[in-house]
Amino acid sequence: MVVDDSVVARGLTTRWLEEERDFEVVASCRSGREAVAKVVDSRPDVIILDVEMPDMDGVEALPLLLSARPHAAILMASSHTTEGAGLTLKCLQLGATDFLPKPSRQANSVEYRRDLVARVRALGQVAQRRAQLAPAPAVAAVRPAAAAPVARSPIRLAPAASAAPARMSALAIGSSTGGPQALHEVLKAAGPSLGSVPILIVQHMPAGFTAALAEHLSTGCGIRAREAQDGEDILPGRAYVAPGGRHFSIARAGGRVVAKLDDGPRVNFCKPSVDPMFRTASAVYGAGLFAVMLTGMGSDGASAVPVVAAAGGRVVAQDEATSVVWGMPGAAVATGACSAVLPLQQIGHCIARAARGERM
């Protein structure tokens, strides 16, 4: 389902999606009100929902759509404005699965189309998984024979150290699709234990949205979060969010640890990328680094996981069942260098134990 008050945007989005052989556009709506009226009959798996619309905007329509179609994955189409970023994060809090900023210039439409198709395809799988996990209806029905379960290789973890682990001296987190909600839950659960360590965050977001994310984390998690600034000191009890469109790393400068931002090429198709942050944090903090890989598409950060482990640091990955998309954490787990694979609800408490110098 495509929901946008712009005729041009609806038409382009519909055409792009219908040119993909595995998609079917089941409805095209000019307002949130029209989408709510059509969602039951059209039964979409993925809803592309414009944030700002007259006659019921995306914020108002979102909970109504989820109530009528609980397993649907909703992709918010957002403007690049400061107001648009704030509204988008509110939608993610209300249950939207992901967001994609609309291109600010026509020249960006090719990249936007590629990202749109990739996200809709991934979110279609999310919606199908949710539907399979939904409670079965009470009415008896003839069911086809269940398919044989897919065989999975056992998860390999890094060998547990025989000595007591080093006390955590820094927390580094990488995330993407589903990340804002996961970050909020993890940091809130970790609580006051984070007052003694710096928190380094790379969340895949474009410029303008990461400032809103930092404000959102400050308000909701009781921590002091801000976008990282080039050359500033990295201090305990503060959270530093990589600015959208710039890579974030850290380095020692005398007795200080400082932030480094650069405008280099994308790493793993991402900018900011988790890789340079994990690698440089490992070089600075060594065995004191506690790294976390949360939900997200792709494999960004996975190549840095063995680097963290080789320096004596620990890496925890979010498990598949609680990840919106098990791309990034799954790739991290596949390296065999993670110390643990945990449900989202347990990661914050695990961080708190590590901050107190306890075993995981």
Image: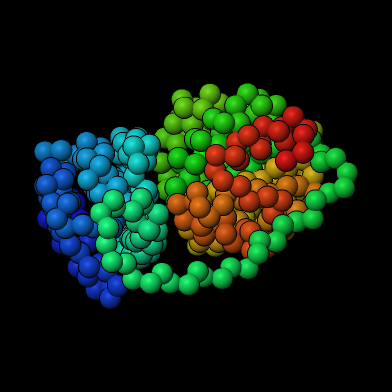
Residue at x 49%, y 41% (from the top left corner): 182
Residue 225 in the image: x percent, y percent? 54, 30
Whether residue 305 is situated above or below residue 253 in the rendered picture? below
Tell whether 279 sits left or right of 132.
right
Residue 123 in the image: x percent, y percent? 37, 58
Residue that lies at the very extreme toward the front in this rendered image: 140
Whether residue 213 is situated above or below residue 265 in the rendered picture? above
Q: Quadrant of residue 345?
A: top right
Q: Quadrant of residue 95?
A: top left
Residue nearest the observer in this picture, 18 or 240:
18
Residue at x 36%, y 50% (from the top left corner): 135
Residue nearest the observer in this picture, 298 or 35:
35
Residue 174 in the image: x percent, y percent? 57, 48
* Chosen colour scheme: rainbow
Q: Quadrant of residue 357?
A: top right
Q: How many marks?
A: 0
Residue nearest the observer in this picture, 78 or 57:
57
Q: Is residue 229 visible?
A: no
Residue 94 in the image: x percent, y percent? 34, 37
Quarter in which the N terminus is drawn: bottom left
Quarter in which the C terminus is drawn: top right
Residue at x 57%, y 31% (from the top left corner): 189
Tell whether 173 sits left or right of 81.
right
Residue at x 63%, y 59% (from the top left corner): 333
Tell whether 121 sits left or right of 234.
left
Q: Is residue 42 visible?
A: yes
Whether residue 219 is situated above or below residue 326 in the rendered picture? above
Residue that lies at the very extreme toward the right in this rendered image: 163
Tell whether 250 sits left or right of 132.
right
